[in-house]
Image (tube, grey):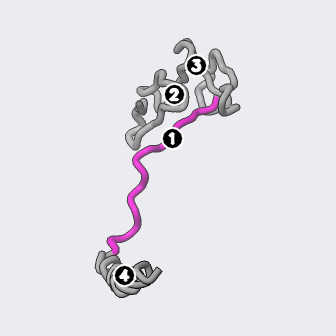
Amino acid sequence: MKALALRCGLLAPFVVACGLLAPSLCAAVPMTGPLPAPSAVEADWQGPLSLPPRFRNHCVIDFFSGRHYCSNHCGIDYQFYYCSSRSFGCCRIGFGYCDGYRQLRCHP
């Protein structure tokens, strides 16, 4: 017990000093203005109503999430994503997104 109390007594000043120094280090970073816009426009999921009518084929409800999606002839376990008239296609269910340039990307 005495050893534990002695160790806590020795650590207390160190903890207090770190607590006083940490805020001063964080305050030294200058603010540069508002945060930049996120790079992804549409993430993870697109429902049937967000697709143009010609791509609303083979729409079903995902068993795990309960959300609707369309595969548009992509095959089982794939979802159709539409980012722009020049960028659309198939990705695994829930892994597609449109980046800041409205280009389709498929995450792992």
**Residue, disc 1:** 42
Q: Nearer the viewer, mark 3 or mark 4?
A: 4
- Which quarter of the rendering shows the C terminus? top left
- Residue 33 location, quadrant: bottom left
Q: Nearer the viewer, mark 4 or mark 2?
A: 4
Amino acid, disc 4: Leu
Q: Which mark is first along the chain, 1 or 3?
A: 1
Identify the secondary structure beneath mark 1. strand
Residue 104 visible to an observer of this rendering: no
Q: CA distance from mark 1 to mark 2?
A: 10 Å
- Residue shown at the point (54%, 31%) measured from the top left: 94
Residues under numbered marks 1 and 2 in contact, where contact means CB atoms less than 8 Å apart: yes
Mark 4 crowdedness (10 Å alpha carbons): few <14, some 14-19, many ≥20: few
**Residue, disc 2:** 81
> Where residue 77 sits in the image (x, y, percent)?
55, 19
Q: Which mark is residue 11?
A: 4
Boundaries of the magenta span:
31-47
Looking at the picture, tell me which residue is in the foreground, 108 or 101: 108
> Where residue 7 sits in the image (x, y, percent)?
38, 80
Mark 3 crowdedness (10 Å alpha carbons): few <14, some 14-19, many ≥20: many
**Residue, disc 3:** 71
Q: Main secondary structure of the magenta part?
A: loop
- Residue shown at the point (53%, 23%) measured from the top left: 80
